[in-house]
Amino acid sequence: MLTDNRNVPLIIIVEDDYNHSELMKTSLHGAAEEYCLKIAASLHDARVTIEQHPPDIILTDYRLPDGMGSELVSTVNGLCPVILLTSQGNEQVAVNAMKAGAQDYVVKTSAVFAGISRIVQRGLREWALIQDQKRAKEEFHRIERHLLHVQKLESLGTMSGGIAHDFNNLLQAVLGNLELSLSKLPEDAPARNFICQAFNAAERAARLSKMMLAYSGRGFLNNGELNLTDLIEKNANISAAVISQNILFNLNLNRGLPLILADADQIQQVIMALLINSSESITTANGSIDLSTGVQDFDKKSLNNSRLEEKLAAGRYVWLEVSDSGCGMDVETRNKMFDPFFTTKFTGRGLGMSAVHGLIRSHKGAIMVDSSPGRGTTIRLLFPIINMPNYRVISDVEKE
C-alpha cells in the first residue's frame, strides 16, 4: 500500500516508460506493506529526487534518456540498494550491472511488474543483511586493531617496567655511595661540587625510572585513606607554581568527599602532570584552568568510556577533574596521548601522561577525556570509595 507517511520505506522508481512505471505503482498500491513512492523519468530527475528525499531503495531502468541507470549507484554512494530493471535478458548486461554495484538485476516481465513488492522486500532484506555484515566486519577490525594496540602497550610496559626496576636498584646503590662520599668529605673539598652534580643527576634519573615504573603499573604504592580535596588544598601553592602566571587558576573543590584508598604522593604527581599538560596547551592570553573535585553516581555506559582497559562497575565514585581552555586535541592525538614517549611538544620525554595512565590503573580508577581542537580539554579521573558503613554524602545545604 502506498502512503505519504515518511516513516515507512521510501522507494524511488526511475523509469522513462510511463506504462511501466504505472504498472509498478499499481502493484505497490496492492502490496500488504506500506511504502512511500517517488517516480523520476530521467537520470537528472532521479538525482534531484534523491537529494531532496533520501530513499531506502531505488528501482531504475537500465537505459535512461540521459544516461545509464547504473550511474545512480555512485550517486547514492552506499546509502541504499539499487536494483536495475531492463527489457533485455542479456547476460553481459547483468554482469556489467553487478560490477557497477547494483544489488540486483531483473528482466522486465508482466510477472515482475505484478510482483514488484516482493522484489522490494527481498532487496530491503538483503540490504539490511549486507549492512549487518559490514558493521560486524568493521567492529571485528576495530577490536583487532584495539587488541594489537593493547598488546603493544602491555609488551612495552613489561619491558620498561623490568628495565626501570633494575635500573632503579642500581641508582639507589649509586645514590647511597654518593651520599656516603659527601658525608665523609669536608665542606671545602674540591671534589664535593662534582659529587653533588653527580648526585643531582642520579636523582633525576631515579625520578625518570619511577615514571617508567608508574607507567608499567609496577611502582610502589604507599596507600592510605585520602581525601582528595584536602590533598589539593594542602598542595595548592605547589600546584599553582607549575602554571604560567598569565593563566587563571580556579579551584572548585567539594569538601564533603568520602575517603579513597590512594598514595598521596602519587596522586599529587598525577595532578601536577595534568596541570603542566594543561598549562602548556594554552598559548593565548587570558586562558584558564579549573581543578575540581566531586562525588557522583556513574552508570555502566559512561564508565565504558574510560581510557583504561579495566572498566569499573556502575556505582558511586570520587572524581578529580582538570579542565583547560587550551588548544584541544584531535582524534589522533587523543588516541595516542597516553602512549609512552608520545608528545606534541618540541621538548619533553612524553612520559607524564603515560605515568598518569599507569598510576590511575594502579589505583583501580578510570580516566575520561573530552577534547577537540579549539575547545580545550577536560580530563576526569575516577577513584573507588572506601566502603564506610556510616558514610553519607554531605549536601550543599549542610556544607553552608
Image: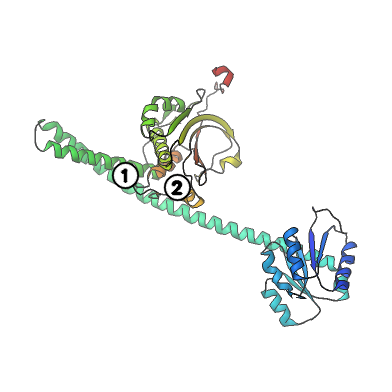
Q: Which residue is mark 1?
A: 165
Task: Report the quarter where the C terminus lies.
Answer: top right
**Residue nearest the observer in this picture, 357 or 348:** 348
Disc tally is 2
Q: What colour scheme does the image use?
A: rainbow
Select label 1 or label 2 by which is in front. 2
Q: Name the residue located 61 percent from the left edge and 42 percent from the top edge.
A: 301
Q: Earlier in the sequence, mark 1 or mark 2?
A: 1
Amino acid type for the residue under numbered disc 2: Met
Residues tagged 1 and 2 counted as in contact (Cβ below 8 A): no
The answer to whether residue 235 is seen in the rendering is no
Task: Report the quarter where the N terminus lies.
Answer: bottom right
Amino acid type for the residue under numbered disc 1: His
Residue 233 position within the rendered picture, expressed as x and y whole percent measured from the top left: 42, 25
The answer to whether residue 68 is seen in the rendering is yes
Single out the residue that lies furthest toward the front.
285
**Residue nearest the observer in this picture, 210 or 379:** 379
Q: Residues within 10 Å of mark 2 (few under 14, many from 20)?
A: many
Q: Which residue is mark 2?
A: 337
Vertical side of 322 occupied by 54: above or below:
below
On the rendered structure, is 23 left or right of 164?
right
Report which quarter residue 305 is drawn in: top right
Measured in 3D between alpha carbons, the distance from the residue under mark 1 to the one under mark 2, in whole angstroms, is: 24 Å
Q: Name the residue located 64 percent from the left edge and 61 percent from the top edge.
A: 134
Secondary structure state at the residue bearing disc 2: loop
Residue 225 position within the rendered picture, expressed as x and y whole percent measured from the top left: 44, 26
